[in-house]
Amino acid sequence: MRKYKRKLIISLSVLIFPWLTAPFIGTKSFVRFLPVATFANLFIIVFTVIANQKKMV
C-alpha cells in the first residue's frame, strides 16, 4: 500500500507542478502553445488506450 501511495503522489505532482508555472509564461505564449499541448496529450491518451487493450489480450 505504501508503494502505491508513493506512486500516486509522484504522478499527481508531475501533473500539478507544470500548471503552477502557467502564470509565469504569459497569456500570449500560453494561448500559442495550448493547441500543441492539447494535441500531444490527445496523442498520448490514444496510445495509452491502445497499449492497455493490447496488454489485456
Image (cartoon, rainbow, N blue to C red):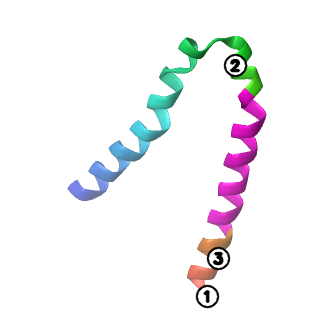
Mark 2 or 3: the one toward you: 2
Verify whether residue 48 appears in magenta. Answer: yes
Mark 1 or 2: the one toward you: 2
Along the horizontal axis of the image, is 18 left or right of 41?
Answer: left
Locate residue 7, reporting x and y percent.
33, 52
Q: Earlier in the sequence, mark 1 or mark 2?
A: 2
Which SS class for mark 3?
A: helix
Q: Report the residue marked by disc 1.
A: 57
Q: What stretch of residues is rendered in magenta?
A: 33-49
Which picture quadrant has residue 45? Answer: bottom right
Q: Please identify the dominant SS of the magenta region.
A: helix
- Marking on residue 46: none
- Marking on residue 29: 2
Give amino acid for label 1: Val
Identify the residue shown where x is 48% and y is 21%. Answer: 20
Which SS class for mark 1?
A: loop
Identify the residue shown where x is 65% and y is 56%. Answer: 44
Identify the residue shown where x is 59% and y is 16%. Answer: 25
Q: Are marks 2 and 3 in contact (CB under 8 Å)?
A: no
Identify the residue shown where x is 69% and y is 38%. Answer: 37
Locate residue 41, reporting x and y percent.
67, 47
Q: Are marks 3 and 1 in contact (CB under 8 Å)?
A: yes
Which picture quadrant has residue 22? Answer: top right
Alpha-carbon span between mark 1 and mark 2: 43 Å
Give amino acid for label 3: Gln
Locate residue 15, reporting x and y percent.
49, 38
Verify whether residue 47 appears in magenta. Answer: yes
Give amino acid for label 2: Ser
Q: Report the residue marked by disc 3.
A: 53
